[in-house]
Image (cartoon, grey):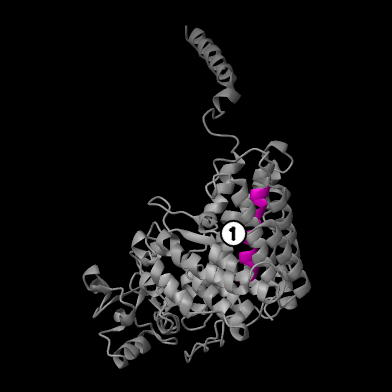
Amino acid sequence: MKKIFKYLWIVLFFGYSTSCDQNFDELNTNTVSATNIDAMFQINQAIISSSPSSFGILVYEVGAVQQVISPNSGVLTGANFNQDNRASTQSNWQQYYRNVIKNTKDALNRIQNDPSRTNLVQMARIIQAYAFMVLTDSYGSIPYFEAGAGYSNQVFFPKYDAQEAIYTDIIKELDEASAALSTTGRIETADVLFAGNVDKWKKFGYSLLLRAGMRLAKANPTLAQQTVAKAFAGGVITNNLDNAIIRHDANYANPAGNTLNATEAANFYLTEPFVNFLKNSNDPRLRSIAVRYVGATSGPEQTPAIQSYDPALQIGMPMGNDNAGAVQAAAELGLASFYDFSQVDRRRMMKLTSPSFVVTAAQSLLLLAEARQLGWITSGTVEGYFHDAIRAHMIQMAQYDPAMEIPLADIDTYIAANPIVDATALQQINEQYWIASFMNGPEAFANFRRSGFPVLDPNPYPGREVLFINRLTYPNSELSVNEENVNAAIAAQGPDNLDTRVWWHK
């Protein structure tokens, strides 16, 4: 009997084992998870991640152009003291390589030969070119031709390319992609930037081409002029209805707005140079941009009950102060504390749902004004482009919040009081570009270095490392992981510090 049970168990065991092997592959295949993704979703992720509003710009770019600073150190050390803080200089690097380039490169690798997605291919090329422009403008030499090829080509340690070569290819990419967009191709209606509107994408691409051309005005005037002419002929953004805007909501908050409405709400202030520039010219934008919590002695006291938008009451924080210095500066000005200085209004302009402007009509019109002043284009007038740009930016204020709307009469008064003067035209144009790019840190920083305007005094902080910040330093991760290639770039470009200039910065 025992033997019978023994043999019976053996038979059952082998039978069970055999049944376990049946349909094994089917049982271990997930029939629910997606095995493919529409490339449009990747491009949308790249678009959303292209927002020029981040924590990093608050620490560096908007401070480098002396618009917004913090008197506090630690994680906020940066342009407030003109010191290197690689925890924040890496912000653009991580944002654009991880979230933009990775997606555009992969999407292009999958759809570049698909004739039904030709418009999406061009859209991806434009967004990618924009991201690379921000990266090379920030750091100089960067991985470009081999960037984003870790998955497709197993290039895990990409070589760095010189900025001159990068700009040559960016110009080619923007020119070709903008021209290749076609209304006869598939319209990518799921696109979060322009809902697939081909005409708007063309204007966006050509506006970036115009920007790239003007960036080279001193480094390569011949190529710059040729590029500007192509962009102008193609048609750029000259109307606010065509602005390239990253829209935010409760689920995807404005990054800088999120920072300014959370832990750092009481730590960032408008600078004295920026506030005084707007006050001295009776600029109506000051009422829209600035708020002062009159008499506040702490962050919790910065409440709507004591807020003021009155331009006459706005007081910017002087440059070059740490926490103790800001306390002293406030006392010397008769303020209750440094919490009494003016701030960018986080309840209107920089709220969680505020839009981020990538390229605007105001910016393109000002670049056209400069191009016309230089004789690089022959249509229109410098004065016409200049005043149209001012008007466009002032009207744009209402897109942040209806309460920021500037009355048309005030716009007309300002324009009448600020005629363009031939002898100072380039300075006037780029001072307005400084204002029109407020809170678009990468672009304000790039154009300030490129044009030399506005004329700003060096940061007077006693412990500063440089007079002016000329570039951002490479992330520590690159120095440790991609050491050979980053060191080759440093050897060719110059020391990896805040003082070294990028190629086009002459």
Q: Look at 54% across and 56% down and name the residue there.
A: 244
Left or right for 351, reference 438? left
Magenta stretch: includes residue 135: yes
Q: Which residues are magenta?
A: 122-138
Please give the name of the residue rendered at 46% of the width and 71% of the height, measured from the top-left corner: 58
Q: Tell which of 458 and 282 is nearer to you.
A: 282
Q: Main secondary structure of the magenta part?
A: helix
Badge 1 marks a residue whose secondary structure is: loop
Residue 262 lies in the magenta-colored region: no
Give above or below for 6 relative to 452. above
Q: Examine the image and state in which quarter residue 170 appears.
A: bottom right
Residue 502, given in percent of the width and then of the height, sits at 67, 76
The disc labelled 1 sits on which kind of residue? Ile
Write the residue at 41% across / 56% down: 253
Q: Dot 1 corresponds to which residue?
A: 237
Q: Quadrant of the C terminus?
A: bottom right
Q: Quadrant of residue 157?
A: bottom right
How far from the left and from the top, in percent, is residue 14?
A: 57, 16
